Image (cartoon, helix red, strand yellow):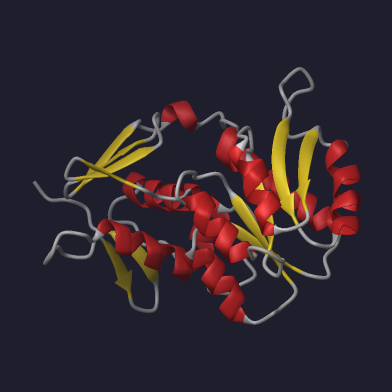
Amino acid sequence: MVRGEDAMEYTILAADDEIELLDVLELYLGRENIRIRKAKDGIEAMEIFRTGGIHLALLDIMMPGLDGFSVLRKIRETSKIPAIMLTAKSEDYDKILGLELGADDYVTKPYNPLEVVARIKAQLRRNYDYHEDTAKKPDILQAKGVVLNAGEGVVTLDGKALELTSTEFKIFRLFLSNPGRIFTRQQIFEQVWEEDYAGDDNTVMVHISNLRSKLDQPSGQETLIKTVKGLGYKIERETK
């Protein structure tokens, strides 16, 4: 179970024009106390999303009406809920575009429903469940005009709130909690996604690129997240 049996269940939005695939997922998700609201196209997906109460979106890229990318764009206008993209293509372009639009993960069709359920549970756990060590980490982290409030899930730059996805927030918190430390792609992936790193995609790089574009807004401001050639990424330790 993702939550205890006495807790309220999660509800996910799943949009795919192959409804029979969603019917199979519904059976597996039901065993995990996860409710699914199914949409056969992008338009219906947005109608369901606007009713509220959705904890995660599972979106097929190729759908009639509105495709998965368009639905994700609209969701990101108002919400930071985790999003997983379903794609029938293996090309990096679809994966990278989805990540750039704010997706947290992707699954390539044909897929094993058990894998999809595992990825859904992982995203729900990371975004809504608290770990034992949460209280041990400082609530407020700062660096060069940027303030991260872990308790409220808010990041501000010179007092102005930044719209970060949940994954971007977690990556940034990892850096701010460890100033001066270099993190490899593998270390970032395994600490943020809590999965073994396959080392064959650009997931971490795309998320860091998106994060940099949001953090480095003032003209002339030095890049906050540094690339250490051949090693990884870090935030410089501030000197007093």
Q: Residue reaching furthest left? A: 240
Q: Is residue 195 left or right of residue 216?
A: right
- Hey, which quadrant is residue 2 in on the image? top right
The residue depicted at 32 percent of the width and 63 percent of the height is 212
Q: Residue 211 or 140: which is nearer the viewer?
A: 211
The answer to whether residue 196 is seen in the rendering is no
Question: On the rendered image, what quadrant is the N terminus found in?
Answer: top right
Q: Residue 31 or 59: which is nearer the viewer?
A: 59
User: Is residue 23 depicted above or below 223 in this figure?
Assistant: above
Q: Is residue 20 left or right of residue 145?
A: right
- Hey, which quadrant is residue 222 in on the image? bottom left
The residue depicted at 83 percent of the width and 42 percent of the height is 29
**Position in image of residue 164 (x %, y %):** 40, 50
Q: Residue reaching furthest bottom? A: 91
User: Is residue 114 depicted above or below 91 in this figure?
Assistant: above
The residue depicted at 54 percent of the width and 73 percent of the height is 96
Q: Residue 198 or 87: which is nearer the viewer?
A: 87
**Position in image of residue 58 (x %, y %):** 69, 53
**Position in image of residue 18 (x %, y %):** 84, 62
Q: Is residue 229 left or right of residue 67?
A: left
**Position in image of residue 157 (x %, y %):** 22, 47
| Number of numbered labels in the structure image | 0
- Hey, which quadrant is residue 159 in on the image? top left
Q: Residue 49 or 30: which is nearer the viewer?
A: 49
Q: Residue reaching furthest top? A: 6
